[in-house]
Amino acid sequence: MRVSREQAAENRQRVVATAARLFRERGFDGIGIADLMREAGLTHGGFYGQFGSKEELMAEAVATTLEQSLQRWHERAARHPEDPLGAVVQAYLRPAHRDGPGAGCGFAALASELGRQPKSLRRRLTDTLRGFFDMLGDQIGGKTATARRKHGIHAYSAMVGALVLSRIAEDEELSREILATVAEAITTRQ
C-alpha cells in the first residue's frame, strides 16, 4: 500500500523521534531496526524506504534531538531574562533530567559512543556542540569573544560531565551533590 508524501514524512519524523529516545535510553547497539520500527508503530520493511542505513538514522536522530535541545535552551533563557543562565543550568542539572535519559541530553547519554562514530556523524554534531558553547558563553559573558567561548566550553563540559557522573553514582545524596555543586559553580561564576 502506497502512502502519501505527507504520511511518509510523518512516518519518518516518528521513526527519528523514536530512535532519538531509544538511542539515548539504550545506546546505539541496544536497539535493532526491527524493534525500533515496532516501537514507532511501523513495519520493519518500511525502514529502508526511509533510510539508507542505521547509521543514517543515528546521525539524523542525534542531530535532530540536539538541535531541538539547543532551541529549548534559547527559549528557556528568553523566558527568564532576569537569570537566563541560571534557568538553563537548573533545568539541565536536575534529578529529573538525570533520571530520564531518553528525553534528555544526547551528548550526555551517548558521548562515549559518539566519539567512536564515523567522521560524517561527528562532523554533523560539531556545529551543534559549538552552538551550546556559544549560547552558554553569551550568558556567562566575558570581555572578549575568546573569553566568552572559553567560558561556554568550560560550562557545557562541566554540565555534561556532571550529568554523566550523577547517573553513575548509585548514592542519591552524592548524585544530587554533583548536580548542585556544578550548577552553583557555573551560575556563581558570572
Image (cartoon, rainbow, N blue to C red):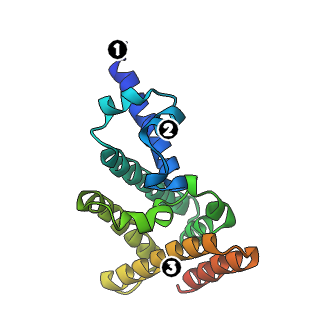
C-beta proximity under 8 Å, tags 3 and 1 = no
Give the amino acid type for the residue marked by disc 3 in the picture: Ala
Q: Mark 2 packing: few (<14 Cα in 10 Å), some, or many (20+)?
A: some
C-beta proximity under 8 Å, tags 2 and 1 = no
Q: Which of the two discs, 2 and 3, labels the residue nearer the N terminus?
A: 2
Q: Is residue 9 visible?
A: no
Give the amino acid type for the residue marked by disc 1 in the picture: Arg
- Using the numbered discs, state the Cα–Cα distance from disc 2 to disc 3 in whole angstroms: 34 Å
Q: What residue sits 51% from the left and 32% below the top?
A: 38
Q: Which mark is residue 163?
A: none
- Using the numbered discs, state the Cα–Cα distance from disc 2 to disc 1 in whole angstroms: 23 Å
Q: Mark 3 packing: few (<14 Cα in 10 Å), some, or many (20+)?
A: some
At numbered mark 1, what does the secondary structure look like: helix, strand or loop? Answer: loop
| Residue at mark 1 | 2
Q: Which of the two discs, 3 and 1, labels the residue nearer the N terminus?
A: 1
Residue 53 at x, y = what percent? Answer: 30, 42
Q: Which of the two discs, 2 and 1, labels the residue nearer the N terminus?
A: 1
Quarter holding residue 168: bottom right
Q: What residue sits 37% from the left and 17% below the top?
A: 3
Question: In the image, 155: left or right of 58?
Answer: right
The residue mark sitting in front, 3 or 1, is 1
| Residue at mark 3 | 158
Query: Is 131 above or below relative to 34?
Result: below
| Residue at mark 2 | 35
Question: In the image, 121: left or right of 97?
Answer: left
- Nearer-the-camera pick, 11 or 92: 11
**Going by the picture, which residue comes out furthest to the top?**
1
Q: What residue sits 43% from the left and 68% below the top?
A: 112
Location of the N terminus by quadrant is top left
Query: Is 150 above or below relative to 97?
Result: below
- Using the numbered discs, state the Cα–Cα distance from disc 3 to disc 1 in whole angstroms: 49 Å
Give the amino acid type for the residue marked by disc 2 in the picture: Asp
